[in-house]
Image: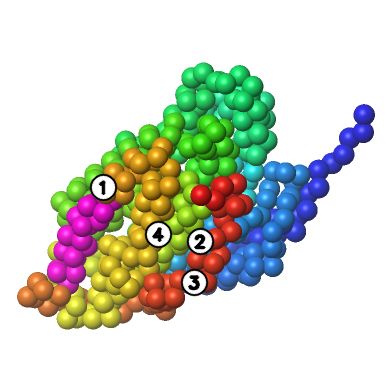
């Protein structure tokens, strides 16, 4: 029997290999300079992310490690999002380095790079165990980063809660994967789909085991995406974590969970469920969770007085909107999800960057801190207002088109296939709750512009933070007015995921 090594094709993994080595360089540089070059460590990290992005642009599409690693349109698109979110999180962290994180700056930046590395491996994974390992490499550094203020009780609490919930969800996910392996006798995603479909055609039914696996996997991934009832960790973790890490959690970790969900539930299980290719077995369940996320997130956010907790509940609601596109399994579904998370990255990372600047100056995240800020810091206030309006879905900003795309995908699928008429209700809940979100977003704008007072604080963001805010503004405005380049890119994602056009 001849034994052949797999075709490693390391060129496809060059960005990931570089990012791992660069994270080690960042940590060693901080140690060698005796932790006296805080800004230099930050700029070194930003440079590494830019170089990694340049390498990503040269890799193109292709496979590595046999069939385990595959750069395809969805993987490359989400890798851009992961690198962008990491770049903006690092740029927002320079203020922390001067006061709150005097030591261990290298470890802080290195862990962000390691988490980003996990996200990138996950995006290209075509095998269940390597996907799970990528998800673990994503979340384990975030456990540490959430508790990085080791002398702050809220930060320590955030790290412990995130660790406990994260460990439990990871155990659920790998347990669900074991059921799928037992049924299909493979951990490769595409062969798994083919084996399950063949068994379904032959036997007519596979009993309750697939549904048990689906329920367990959705529970495990529901934590990563912060879908109810697996959302409880988000408000406390966002409040206690360093603000840039809360931002990174809200975009990077959520996007990683969405990629894992799409790979397992759509790429691996969708065609198995029946001749109509309607994933109603998991679609109903996820649709209910999406409605719960939109209702709970938007309603509870209204009562928050801490802006980080408000943005945490907003993030839960945004997950609900994103999942509308996920359950609409047509050619527009994954397109809308991809564009939504892209637009969400600019708005949410930009909003958290402003919150980080305010917190660095005032030491507070209470909404009352923003009273009269428009008079003393007009540029920062205007930036935050634009980010919040984009999150609310106000035209002509990118957030409006993102919401339109997910609603359009759901309505299109419901009108085309009678098995999906329930999507009308899901889209209706989304439209109604989007109105609720206007209240708490507008309340922050009201505090800044119409409080009748003048804030005693004059905010002058440093160059890195100002750059992050500028990137966010360019993103929400430019891609709201001219989204065609991104929309053209994401049109290839459904075909790569095996979605049959409607």
**Res 20 label:** none
Q: Which residues are magenta?
A: 430-448
**Whether label 2 touches label 1, CB < 8 Å:** no
**Res 81 label:** 2
Kindly report which numbered mark, 4 or 2, lies closer to the viewer in this rendering. 4
Task: Pick out the residue farthest to the left.
Answer: 452
- Distance from disc 1 to disc 3, alpha carbons, whole Å, reads 28 Å
Q: Answer left or right for 380 relative to 495.
A: left
Q: Nearer the viewer, residue 59 or 134?
A: 59
- Residue 419 in the image: x percent, y percent? 41, 37
The residue to which callout 1 is attached is 429
**375, above or below 333, in the image:** below
- Distance from disc 2 to disc 1, alpha carbons, whole Å, reads 28 Å
**Whether label 3 touches label 2, CB < 8 Å:** no
Sequence-first tag of 3 and 2: 2
Sequence-first tag of 2 and 1: 2
**Whether label 1 touches label 3, CB < 8 Å:** no
- Distance from disc 3 to disc 2, alpha carbons, whole Å, reads 17 Å
The residue to which callout 4 is attached is 405
Q: Mark 2, residues whose alpha carbon is within 10 Å: few (<14), some, or many (≥20)?
A: many
- Distance from disc 1 to disc 4, alpha carbons, whole Å, reads 15 Å
Which residue corresponds to the image point at 8% horizontal and 75% vertical from the top-left?
453
Task: Pick out the residue farthest to the right.
Answer: 1
Which residue corresponds to the image point at 55% horizontal and 60% vertical from the top-left?
491
Sequence-first tag of 1 and 3: 1
- Residue 422 visible from this viewpoint: yes
- Residue 252 in the image: x percent, y percent? 46, 55
The residue to which callout 3 is attached is 484
Q: Majority secondary structure of the magenta segment?
A: helix
Q: Would you say residue 383 sits in the magenta stretch?
A: no
């Amino acid at each position: 029997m001849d034994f052949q090594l797999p075709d490693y094709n390391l060129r496809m993994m060059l960005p990931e290999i570089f990012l791992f080595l660069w994270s080690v360089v960042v940590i060693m540089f901080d140690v060698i300079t005796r932790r006296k070059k805080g800004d230099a460590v930050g700029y070194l990290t930003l440079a590494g992310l830019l170089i990694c992005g340049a390498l990503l642009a040269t890799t193109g599409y292709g496979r590595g490690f046999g069939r385990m690693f595959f750069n395809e349109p969805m993987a490359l698109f989400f890798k851009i999002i992961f690198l962008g979110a990491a770049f903006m999180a690092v740029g927002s962290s320079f203020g922390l380095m001067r006061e709150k994180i005097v030591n261990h700056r290298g470890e802080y930046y290195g862990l962000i790079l390691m988490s980003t590395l996990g996200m990138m491996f996950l995006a290209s994974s075509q095998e269940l165990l390597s996907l799970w390992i990528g998800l673990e490499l994503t979340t384990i550094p975030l456990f540490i980063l959430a508790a990085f203020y080791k002398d702050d009780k809220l930060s320590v609490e955030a790290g412990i809660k995130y660790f406990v919930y994260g460990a439990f969800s990871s155990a659920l996910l790998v347990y669900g994967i074991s059921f799928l392996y037992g049924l299909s006798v493979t951990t490769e995603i595409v062969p798994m789909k083919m084996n399950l479909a063949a068994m379904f055609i032959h036997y007519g039914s596979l009993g309750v085991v697939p549904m048990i696996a689906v329920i367990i996997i959705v529970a495990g991934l529901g934590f990563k995406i912060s879908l109810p009832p697996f959302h409880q960790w988000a408000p406390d973790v966002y409040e206690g974590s360093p603000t840039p890490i809360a931002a990174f959690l809200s975009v990077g970790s959520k996007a990683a969970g969405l990629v894992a969900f799409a790979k397992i539930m759509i790429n691996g299980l969708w065609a198995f469920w029946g001749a109509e290719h309607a994933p109603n077995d998991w679609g109903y369940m996820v649709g209910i969770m999406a409605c719960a996320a939109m209702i709970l997130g938007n309603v509870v956010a209204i009562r928050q007085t801490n802006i980080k907790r408000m943005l945490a509940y907003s993030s839960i609601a945004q997950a609900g909107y994103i999942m509308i596109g996920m359950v609409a399994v047509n050619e527009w579904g994954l397109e809308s999800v991809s564009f939504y998370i892209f637009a969400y990255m600019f708005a949410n990372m930009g909003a958290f960057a402003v919150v980080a600047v305010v917190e660095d100056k005032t030491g507070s995240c209470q909404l009352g801190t923003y009273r009269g800020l428009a008079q003393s810091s007009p540029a920062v206030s205007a930036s935050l207002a634009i980010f919040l309006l984009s999150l609310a879905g106000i035209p002509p900003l990118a957030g409006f088109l993102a919401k339109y795309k997910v609603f359009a995908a759901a309505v299109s699928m419901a009108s085309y296939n009678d098995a999906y008429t329930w999507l009308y209700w899901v889209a209706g809940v989304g439209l109604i709750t989007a109105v609720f979100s206007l209240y708490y977003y507008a309340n922050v704008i009201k505090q800044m512009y119409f409080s009748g007072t003048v804030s005693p604080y004059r905010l002058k963001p440093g160059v890195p933070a100002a750059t992050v805010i500028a990137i966010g503004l360019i993103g929400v405005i430019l891609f709201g007015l001219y989204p065609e380049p991104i929309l053209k890119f994401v049109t290839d994602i459904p075909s790569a995921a095996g979605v049959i056009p409607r």
